[in-house]
Image (tube, rainbow, N blue to C red):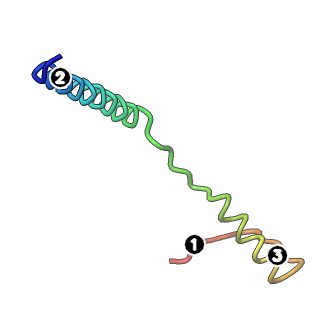
Amino acid sequence: MNTHELLTVCLLAFFWVFAVLAILAIIMRVMTIAFPQKDTTSDIPLYTAITAVIGQILPGTRVTKIEEVK
């Protein structure tokens, strides 16, 4: 195999990899548009952490309502 053939094989491999990655990127984009991330309004780990901290600071208390103050 001479240098010219090796260069051709390397360039073809590079362009094929580029084409495959471009196709995968397009598929990923279509999937993110078709299945958008759901926005969750509840923040259960945050509520659990707040309840645990309040329980340690003020033993015997119960958290019944958490509101955001702006």
Labels 2, 3: front one: 2
**SS under mark 2:** helix
Residue holding disc 1? 68
Specify the amino acid type for callout 2: Leu
Q: Position of residue 28 (x, y in %)?
A: 37, 33
What separation in Å lies between label 2 and label 3 (alpha carbons)? 70 Å
The answer to whether marks 2 and 3 mark residues whose Cβ atoms lie closer than 8 Å is no
Q: In this image, 12 relative to 36: left or right?
A: left
Q: Quadrant of the N terminus?
A: top left
**SS under mark 3:** helix
The residue sitting at 89% across, 77% down in the picture is 60
Q: In this image, 24 relative to 39: left or right?
A: left
The residue sitting at 43% across, 40% down in the picture is 36
Residue holding disc 2? 6
What separation in Å lies between label 1 and label 3 (alpha carbons)? 19 Å
Q: Residues within 10 Å of mark 2 (few under 14, many from 20)?
A: few
